[in-house]
Image (cartoon, rainbow, N blue to C red):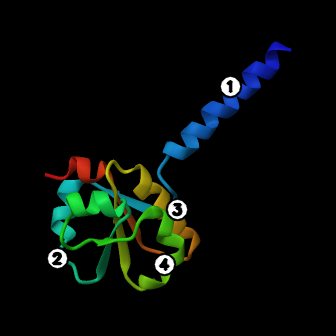
């Protein structure tokens, strides 16, 4: 009967590991690397934080599309341009990158560390 506890424990660990791993086909950049990309007109920048978070502090080039609205508003983005996604810490933006990949976006970039790493 103890083996069931080990199986459940292993499944929980596996669940958390898969949530933390970067999404396949998604490029990850640092906030320092982001600074070099902000002037690129062939990229679209999306901040997936809440409107309140965005209003408090944001990067001018980023458009606010909260994570919970991303699937409904994905038509506002071009699949022909790279999408660079940011949030507060990098967790929500990683989820957003997964959503975008499932929606058929080929070039998706996640900003590691998010706004917390932005200076």
Few, some or many residues within 10 Å of mark 1 (<14, 14–19, 20+)? few
Name, please, the residue furthest toward the left.
119
Image spot of residue 28 (x, y percent): 36, 57
| Disc with the residue nearer the chain's start (2 vs 4) | 2
**Nearer the observer, 2 or 46:** 46
Work out how far the residue at label 2 is from the one at label 4, CA to CA, in angstroms. Answer: 22 Å
Q: Nearer the viewer, mark 3 or mark 4?
A: 4
Earlier-in-chain disc, 3 versus 4: 4
Vertical side of 11 occupied by 106: above or below: below
**Of 68 and 43, the residue lying toward us:** 68
Residue of label 2 = 39
Q: Secondary structure at mark 4?
A: helix
Residue under label 1, please give it. Answer: 9
Residue under the image location 37 percent in, 82 percent down: 81
Look at discs 4 and 1 and give the one toward the viewer: 4
Write the residue at 43% across / 84% down.
76
Residue displayed at 73% across by 27% down: 8
Q: Quadrant of the N terminus?
A: top right
Residue located beneath label 4 in the image: 74
Residue 25 visible somewhere in the drawing? no
Decide: marks 4, 1 in contact (CB < 8 A)? no
């Amino acid at each position: 009967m103890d083996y069931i506890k080990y199986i459940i424990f292993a499944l929980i660990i596996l669940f958390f590991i898969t949530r933390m791993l970067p999404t396949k086909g998604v490029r990850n950049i640092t906030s320092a690397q982001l600074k070099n990309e902000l002037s690129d007109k062939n990229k679209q920048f999306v901040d997936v934080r809440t409107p309140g978070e965005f209003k408090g502090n944001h990067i001018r080039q980023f458009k606010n599309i909260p994570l919970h609205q991303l699937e409904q508003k994905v038509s506002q983005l071009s699949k022909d341009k790279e999408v660079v996604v940011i949030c507060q810490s990098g967790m929500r933006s990683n989820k957003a990158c997964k959503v975008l990949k499932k929606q058929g976006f080929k070039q998706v970039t996640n900003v590691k560390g998010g706004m917390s790493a932005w200076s």
